[in-house]
Amino acid sequence: MLANTPLGKLSPASLFVVGLAAAFVIFVIVQAITSPATLLQTVAASLGLGAVYSIIALGFVLIFKATQTINFAQGSLAVAGALFLSFAVSDGHIPFTTIANPLLNIGGPSWIPWVLSVFMALFFAAILGAIVERIAIRPMVGQPLFSVAVITLGLEFILRTLNNDTSETEFRSLEVPWGSEGFKIGDALINWSFVVSIALAIVSFIAVFLFYRSRLGIAMRAVAFDQEAAMAQGIDVGKVFAIAWIAGSMLATLGGIMGTQPPVKQTGAIDPQTATIAFRALPAVVLGGLDSASGALLGGLIVGFAEIFAGQYLSSYASTIGAGYPLIIPYVVMLIGLVVRPHGIFGTPEIRRV
Amino acid sequence: MLELSNLEVVYNDVILVLRGLSIEVPDEKIVALLGANGAGKTTTLRAISGLLDVHEGAITKGTVTYNGERVDTQKPSEIVQTGITQVMEGRRVFAELTIDENLRTGAFTNKDKKSVQDAYDKTMELFPVLKERRSHTAGYLSGGEQQMLAIGRAMMANPDLLILDEPSLGLAPLLVEQIRDIIVDINKSGVSVLLIEQNAAMALSISDYGYIMENGKIVLDGEAEKLRNDEDVQEFYLGLHTDESGERKSFRDVKHYKRRKRWLS
Ligand SMILES: Nc1ncnc2c1ncn2[C@@H]1O[C@H](COP(=O)(O)OP(=O)(O)OP(=O)(O)O)[C@@H](O)[C@H]1O
Ligand SMILES: [Mg+2]
């Protein structure tokens, strides 16, 4: 795209981005020569963080595609799913009950009960997503999109309160089979959670792309394009909304689980901050394009790289730019991206509504 | 048989658009519904297919029944399942989806794989142009091809009644003929057709019966043959005579005038 455009024809903003990219490439080459181990570690962490952002961004995209609204409750849905898993594997019982988690006695390698419990958490997330959609979103079909967005913001607060009440402790640990282990490539230490996040992101994206080609997926894309014409084909718009919320809630759960692990968090625990993972991923969604799954993937990776690289290589300037600077990087990247492409990298320029 | 009786439709609780409309579409026939811009043709279609809601419209009086069953209380998806599908005004193909995917949306209510495949094969036979471009994005099709896709999509649900809203709109004469022939073919395969048109010549040339509406009411109806030979229809809808003043009077004014004349004589 950019490669065969004469540089002279680019807008100043695009030139700025091209310049940034060129500087980044040169920087990476220099680092690869001077300290390859640090660079490798940084790249792995970037991919890990980018993967988590991508998974959460994908949830935003699915719900946006179907309902044309940004779901501000994505963060609490993420925490709800992660809490469920924490109760099931760390406390060893089914949440809200005293029944012991039967999956823990299955035997075999220790990761099998964990993986099965993750599936149980996803099932719970699906039900939660369906309930929330049915109670709070469905009655709003056809109402102004702004009102629906504000409703999701209200949901965020309600769910956050419920989460905090059920979680019992401020820091609730979420055990993972690999603990905080990693492996070494040369001198670079790579955490297993990076690998798991990347694998989950790949699986999520393949699942979504397959879904897009299925009967229901095509229906969802039809609804996204022209709701009335979709209804005229006999497509049940309510059903499409429900599926989007179920899928969005399940993706949020995956993101919530991995959001308690490095590189997002070193503690391996769910705490009141965990819900903000969705707001950290939001720039990735907007940058990629609100209605594009590929955009979620690319946006997530760009933001992940920017955040980790800035955290790693700008730390000596922290006293000047403020200690919390890595957290604002996603928004800075988003702003730069939007100046060049106002609808995001892969976003549809015209957002249709009925 | 589709029956609309005494239908009254209101938009936004105040704008009365259909004022006691009654029409019938018998099985296996082609019925034309003609009328000028704003007569309420599309509104009639929305009332049949349950899409008034989307436009803040509602049926305030009268009923729509299909084979004796009320459909005006059903959801759009249920109405499609009873066998009524439509080709919307302006085609409304899903431009970002491929042709195959567009067709699959039309088969949404049909969960039987075999019958979807049959409908698909039949559609491809009817529209060879689409077959060549199955995996192309629909947005790149020409207007005529999009109209064919819209008809093909509506046929994917195996309808018993197909309603088309101005399928000839914006098409070149040759394409209009092609579309007309396709409608005849579809009807011959046993599907009843309600053809909404402004192109009265085309519509009356293939239909069995016709209704002419103005301001939300039927002002004239009869066998297509009879309508074709009706002087007023010729003047106002077939464009065969031109008014000396060059002004197009409302069809209803003429009727009143004629009635009065008959009254006096
Ligand atoms: N959503 C709406 N809200 C209010 N009024 C409407 C709405 N849709 C249509 N109308 C009005 O209802 C009347 C009939 O419109 P309709 O679209 O049914 O006419 P039509 O016969 O299909 O016309 P055309 O040949 O131009 O398609 C028009 O006066 C129109 O302005
Ligand atoms: Mg119309």
Image (cartoon, rainbow, N blue to C red):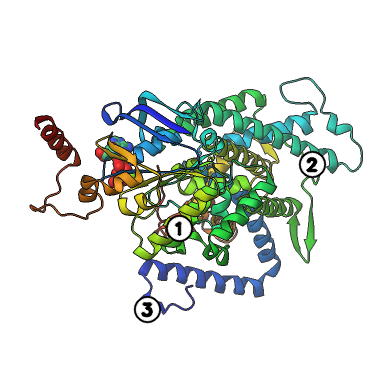
Report crowding for label 1: few under 14, some 14 to 19, many 20 or more residues within 10 A (C-alpha).
few
**Can the viewer see residue A92?**
yes
Q: Amino acid at mark 2?
A: Val
Q: CA distance from mark 3 to mark 2?
A: 54 Å
The answer to whether marks 3 and 2 sit on the same chain is yes
The residue indicated by pointer 2 is: A115
Chain where mark 1 sits? B
Q: CA distance from mark 1 to mark 3?
A: 55 Å
**Mark 3 or mark 2, earlier in chain:** 3
- Ligand 2 resides in the quarter of the picture at top left
The residue indicated by pointer 1 is: B181
Q: CA distance from mark 2 to mark 1?
A: 60 Å
Residue A100 appears at what percent x and percent y?
82, 24
Q: Amino acid at mark 3?
A: Gly
Residue B162 appears at what percent x and percent y?
48, 44
Disc sitting over residue A8 in the figure: 3
Report crowding for label 2: few under 14, some 14 to 19, many 20 or more residues within 10 A (C-alpha).
some
Q: Secondary structure at mark 1?
A: helix
Does residue A265 appear left or right of residue A318 in this picture?
Answer: right
